[in-house]
Image (cartoon, coloured by chain):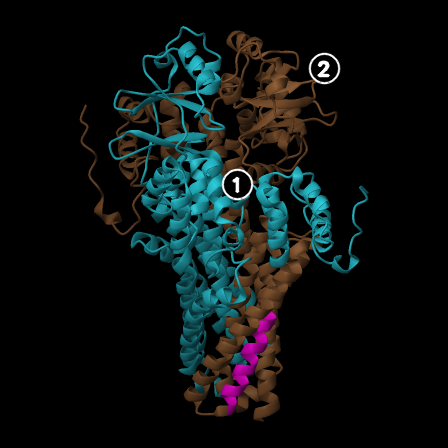
Chain colours: A brown, B cyan
């Protein structure tokens, strides 16, 4: 079979390269698969996909269009590994799940680690869930049902049930012998847990330490007693904090009675960290979630709400301008200059706001240093306010040859940059305090403040001193 | 000693709670330490800090003020663990390093894992680096010097040198015996590497698998041959992609000759993922880096540049308004309404832009799906453009009782939301293509486009049809 890479399509030369790196999938591969699908060349398709990691298959699927995806899944048939689903964006995942045969889904779901199975299963609609549950072996069904009773985004949902827990009386040698004989261990694990007779964890031993210890030594002699347990209902954001803060690779999950029921591993946490960072970034811009693969209609609806709120705030700013219609009629230069003050306030406030939102999310900002933060931002606002007052004042003076207009824009600029600093710092802190996600609501409140203060200060001062 | 928690200071009741959770440090702890420092109660200070994880000590330091920090470090003396430094924000870290004795620094640096030592060392100024290098044992000095020759933010800087590599002839039993005898192994590790006589990795065995295998089995029989090696010069962003994509816990680093020289572990990668996410978020808002702990002057300077660029774009928008001074003089209602069109364009464009920047950073957006993305955003822009044209048109008509003003704002709104969608999608793609970080430059280009198009469309149409 020819190994010549397919020719590049130069019409897309202006687009960024698809991952030119050694890892991940290449644009060439996507095109090769796409062409093989068009030719219905099943052997070539299978060859191209055969050695790919599940995560790469997921990327490949996301780079194909809807028809190509369906055809690829059909061609792969039983060789399509369900683990691929865990790497897919939700809309694509749902689309593929719908195209899979129920029997295949049920059979393969049993083979996955419990956290992956839950991850796939929780996205299905009620009806599909019931049908698949009915098709599952009883043991798997019970585990899945139990996992789904935990709240969404809780540790119970992301933990895997497979783990290695041994009694406190065991030695290293006994543990190794048990591991060699046991069949039901997880694929990969990094710590082994020592539990008391109530199955509560009393310590853990990293595998590297267990392997370095002589057989007769008891595990309790080498265990770390400081077990950072995760309650099964802990929110995943909290779990991510714990892993990040203490550099964990895995952590034990306990139920209400303190019994060891599962393990969260760092690979799941990396995804949560990505998700949380993405959420904050997108929420600040008024986007609900990554909608790269959502339908146009869903995306339009989701973004409409945010834009509607912004329309209200823009109208509010216009109402403020409306108070000064008389002034504007007499000095039209004010209409030309007024957006500068509002825009600078918005940008300066967004700088402060973004630092605050990120710091709150990372828990770097709290009651202990909030006052200092607000104070510092106020000073920065005053400092930049003075500098931009001078610059904007000079520009306005030269432009309209009226020194008083320069003085007025300078004063309005200083006022608005101070207002921006204060609201950029206080709005997210206040929202966090009353339990509203500062990433969602901060920026709309901020720009309302900076628009209103900006127009009010500039036009108000002008009305007082220029008329 | 009394265990009563210090009283809460109600004057800070409006501030968000310091981590009320079971992990991390509490506001009470910060206050207790602060009070003990004031009383110069060394015993109490040591007691409060004794059982804290290094990461928590770092958080505690960040929550204290400069004088308290210096005093705490002095009180802890030799009990202050240098590993704490790796968890600190850079400005605080530099401050503390300067206050430490050179001899203590040199002595403790030798005890750290090589990646932590490099992490701390690379932030020192040239002079301090030289003095500490001179004070280090020769072996440690050579390792540090070699690490520092790798480019900043490369795999060479974040890897640790300590690793377990064994020849391909070894059995599980031989490996375990070696591990029990060896002294120079890393604190924690998750995979062992099998190397050929040239010290090139030919496979790896997860510790969990090695432990589950009987002693006489050769490692080559159970190893994974698909080793995803990391070139020592690979950028850390690339490293993070690799870990995230394949759910890795550790990965081997090789030099130009393909020889195994180190290992990157997931805890370092989690920090990189946090850093990269933070960078994108902050850059979009025109902030250089987390400046929570930077001095007011540094912060002011860093943000000044961004605001200055924004001033230019705001002036550019004002110049556009200036073209229509005559029109504005005749119909002052236009001045009242014009910010609405510009503001809606800016917000809608930011939605698209943020999705694009994030998708580019996560490599979800590439040549394979860029055209589809642009097409979809265009449709969303048209759809929301039509809806907001209707809403804004109705508002303007009712407000000023002039149907034609409603028609004009509607047309301008549609034009600007389409322009916003196109530039929100194309600007980041274009910047990425020419090698400019889209997170830094996109939003300033976008708002210039939406301001200029917004004012031009609204005032231009008004000049044509209302005069």
Q: For residue A23, what is the image quadrant?
A: top left
What residue is pinned by disc 2? A197
Give the camera-side residue of B196 and A148. B196
Q: Residue furthest bottom?
A: A467
Residues at marks 2 and 1, CA–CA distance in whole angstroms: 36 Å
What residue is pinned by disc 1? B83
Quadrant for the C terminus of chain B in the image: bottom left
SS at mark 2?
loop
- Residue at image x 66%, y 34%? A151
SS at mark 1?
helix
The residue segment tinted magenta is A404-420
Q: Do callouts 2 and 1 mark residues in contact (Cβ within 8 Å)?
A: no
- Residue at image x 42%, y 88%? A398
Q: Main secondary structure of the magenta part?
A: helix
Query: Residue A232's x, y, as percent?
Result: 67, 30
User: Mark 2 belongs to which subunit?
Assistant: A
User: How dense is the environment of label 2, judged by Cα within 10 Å: few (below 14), some, or many (20 and up)?
Assistant: few
């Amino acid at each position: 079979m020819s190994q010549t890479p397919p020719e590049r399509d130069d019409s897309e030369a202006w687009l960024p390269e698809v991952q030119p790196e050694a890892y991940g999938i290449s644009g060439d591969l996507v095109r090769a698969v796409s062409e093989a699908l068009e030719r219905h060349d099943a052997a070539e398709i299978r060859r191209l996909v055969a050695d790919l990691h599940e995560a790469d298959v997921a990327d490949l699927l996301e780079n194909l269009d809807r028809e190509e995806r369906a055809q690829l899944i059909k061609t792969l048939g039983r060789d399509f590994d369900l683990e691929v689903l865990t790497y897919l964006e939700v809309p694509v995942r749902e689309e593929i799940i719908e195209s899979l045969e129920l029997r295949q889904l049920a059979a393969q779901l049993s083979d996955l680690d419990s956290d992956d199975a839950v991850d796939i299963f929780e996205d299905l609609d009620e009806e599909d869930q019931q049908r698949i549950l009915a098709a599952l072996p009883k043991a798997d069904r019970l585990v899945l049902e139990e996992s789904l009773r935990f709240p969404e985004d809780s540790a119970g949902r992301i933990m895997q049930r497979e783990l290695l827990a041994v009694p406190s009386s065991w030695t290293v040698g006994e543990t190794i012998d048990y591991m060699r004989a046991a069949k039901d261990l997880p694929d990969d694990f990094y710590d082994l847990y020592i539990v008391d007779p109530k199955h509560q964890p009393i310590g853990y031993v990293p595998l590297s330490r267990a392997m370095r210890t002589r057989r007769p030594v008891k595990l309790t002699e080498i265990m770390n007693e400081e077990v950072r347990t995760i309650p099964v209902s802990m929110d995943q954001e909290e779990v991510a904090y714990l892993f990040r803060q203490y550099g964990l690779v895995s952590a034990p999950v306990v139920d209400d009675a303190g019994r060891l029921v599962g393990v969260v591993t760092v690979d799941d946490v990396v995804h949560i960290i990505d998700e949380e960072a993405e959420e904050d970034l997108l929420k600040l811009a008024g986007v609900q979630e990554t909608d790269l693969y959502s339908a146009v209609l869903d995306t339009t609806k989701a973004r409409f709400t945010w834009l509607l709120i912004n329309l209200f705030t823009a109208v509010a700013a216009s109402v403020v301008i409306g108070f000064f219609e008389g002034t504007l009629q007499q000095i039209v230069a004010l209409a030309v200059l007024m957006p500068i003050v509002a825009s600078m306030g918005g940008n300066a406030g967004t700088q402060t706001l973004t630092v605050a939102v990120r710091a709150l999310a990372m828990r770097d900002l709290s009651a202990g240093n909030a006052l200092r933060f607000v104070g510092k931002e106020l000073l920065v606002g005053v400092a930049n306010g003075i500098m931009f007052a001078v610059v904007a004042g000079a520009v306005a003076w030269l432009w309209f040859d009226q020194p008083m207009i320069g003085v007025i824009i300078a004063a309005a600029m200083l006022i608005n940059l101070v207002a921006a600093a204060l609201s950029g710092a206080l709005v997210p802190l206040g929202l966090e305090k009353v339990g509203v996600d500062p990433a969602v609501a901060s920026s709309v409140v901020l720009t309302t403040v900076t628009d209103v203060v900006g127009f009010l200060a500039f036009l108000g001062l002008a009305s007082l001193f220029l008329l």
